[in-house]
Image (cartoon, rainbow, N blue to C red):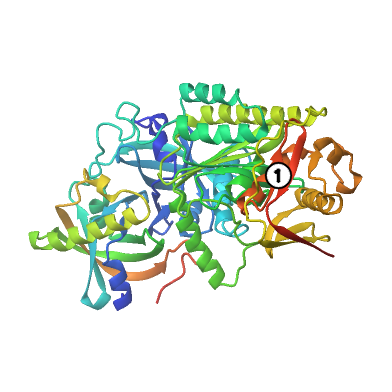
Amino acid sequence: MSRLGLEQMASCFQGLVPAMFFTCSKDGIPNAAFLSHVDYVDPTHVALSFQFFNKSRRNIAENPQALIRVIDPDTNQGYAMRLKYEKSETSGPIFDRMNLRIEAIASYAGLKGIFKLKAADIYLVESVERVPEEPGVKEQRWSPRSGRPDAVFTMKALQDLSMRINTATSLDALLETILSGLKEYFGFSHSMIALVAEKPNTLVTIASRGYPEGGVGAEVQFGEGIIGVVAEAQKPIRISGLLRGMLHANAARKRALDRGLRPDRGGVKLPGLQNPASQLGVPLVVRGELVGVLCLESETPYRFHEEDKTSIELLGSYLAIAIQNMQLQEAGEHGEDSVDEVPARAAAAGNGSSRREITYYRSEEVVMLDGEYLIRSLPARILWKLLQTLKREGRAEFTNRELRLDKSLNLPDYKDNLETRLLLLRRRLEEKGGCVRIVPRGRGRFAVEVGCEVELVERA
Amino acid sequence: MLDKNLTEFLEQGLAIHIGTRNERLQPNGGRVTAVRVEDEGRHIVAFIPKAAHHGVLDDLQSNGQAALSCTRPADDRAVQVKGEFVSMRDADPNEEKFAVAQWEGFLKQLDLIGLPGASTGTWTMWPCVAVKIRVTALFSQTPGPDAGAVLT
């Protein structure tokens, strides 16, 4: 049995530093190969990803003995683990956990269907030894005592965030509070929230922080990218060595394309760091219902740690409840405030003399602004309705209730999420320069402000 | 066997490991500081840290079978060199500069992919044993469906 405990080697199994896998065929020919990920199973077992039927895998089928070398990214200590193959799993929690990570990376690289997990191979760990030529530093480089370069998930940070969230009075404010709190209390500078969209199996980014492009309104299909994979599985995904994983996937992609294999579809265009080293996707789920996904990115390779897992899940549950409660609260406020005393009217951007063309493509339910995509689906139908009313009747003040009662908008009978769609529309218009704006005028009321000359064009 | 292009690739500073096996077909393996291609590509010399105690040298002397995995971290291009043990000796101090330069090339590759190469400063990569291996086969090891294809 091992002299060193696998439980104390959790950092080795984050996928940050690839492992080296040594095998031997039955006729005595050794083989050495990199392995992208070794997964901890229990105190005496690890799981290795089986993605391609390569020489290592053929050797294991003939001779179950293996040696693996791993590096602890915290201390840089090298370990040699002597393994014996026991079985392969193609379903179950271990397979699912490994598959999620690979699916996310594959999807990012546009390799779904090519770069995939065939099985999680389970090995008995017969021994573990420190490698003498690769001694580590005595103190963990990122231990809490030595001071990790970034903040971590702590109960204090969770408490501070929850206290701040409790002060939010609208979905708009809540989302901003979450993202600003994640930066202030946890040190996460790059974050986004995608909520379930009107279209089935689709999410749409509703808020982001730390990305110059904003990216509100970007759609993500279930199963695509880390957000889509998290949504589909409703489980958190933490990727530490994303850059390494992407390089590995891209190498496979190049080979696959050279051979004429085509991936299912291209990559998803979302706000994001150009070279993220770590990503964390957290499903926002309330009583089994997916509300959305929180995605955090970092340029630090080893940003999200195994010991953060419980806190991450707790954070996800809390944020999901907070967002859903606010959605329900806003949707349930059918009564409207009296019109607020309108402050000095914040004019929409533009000098009034500029001319913009807004085109509605009815069959696709897409609105374009000066030939550029603005928004689609329900928010597009709402915008078109508002602008037509403004043009026809000169009326700029609207209520959420009248939109709900408007059959031409085809709102769902159950959980229409109208307030979320209006918020999305408002943010998209702001991102597009603010010539047309939606301005809240109190509970359940808003105004459309137009700061330029607008030509409305409708096409089939 | 190893042409000019492959030689340049192998000697630029890569992640290099050597795999061997004992008489019970148990695999052994360890990190290699540097490699040098000799005799117009028919042989390759692997510089293995003397601090290592992984059974590789015993295996080579007993059965001679060796596999060298050479990977460029920046793009995961990888080649596997199969071979048979010819001889071993203590690496000459004159070879240190060559071997350390190659190791530092590998560390620069690590920096490129966000792994701080300098953090390996505690590792003992020199002095080395120079192990001469006769090249018997070459395989592509770049990840993907063609991994394992024979290189000619």
Name the residue rendered at 18%, 58% in the picture: B100
Q: Considering only vertical position in the picture, is A341 above or below A72?
A: above
**Callout 1: chain:** A
When asked about the image quadrant of residue A447, the answer is top right
Q: Considering only vertical position in the picture, is A267 above or below B138?
A: above
Number of callouts in the render? 1
Q: Position of residue A454 (x, y in %)?
A: 73, 59
Residue A316 shows up from this direction: yes
The answer to whether residue A26 is left or right of residue A345 is left
Name the residue rendered at 62%, 27% in the picture: A168
Name the residue rendered at 56%, 29% in the picture: A315
Q: Position of residue B82 (x, y in %)?
A: 34, 65
Residue B145 shows up from this direction: no
Q: Nearer the viewer, residue B131 or B140?
A: B140
Label 1, secondary structure: give it. Answer: strand
Q: Position of residue A387 (x, y in %)?
A: 79, 52
Q: Mark 1 sits on what residue?
A: A438
Image quarter in which the N terminus of chain A is found? top left
When asked about the image quadrant of residue A295, the answer is top right
- Answer few, some or many: residues within 10 Å of disc 1's Cα (few below 14, many 20 plus, some between 14 and 19): many
The answer to whether residue A18 is left or right of residue B30 is right
Q: Considering only vertical position in the picture, is A274 above or below A160?
A: below
Q: Nearer the viewer, residue A263 or A68?
A: A263
Image quarter in which the C terminus of chain A is found? bottom right
Q: Considering only vertical position in the picture, is A334 above or below B42?
A: above
Q: Nearer the viewer, residue A322 or A71?
A: A322
Residue furthest to the right: A407
Q: Amino acid at mark 1?
A: Ile
Name the residue rendered at 40%, 77% in the picture: B152
Q: Position of residue A399 (x, y in %)?
A: 81, 37
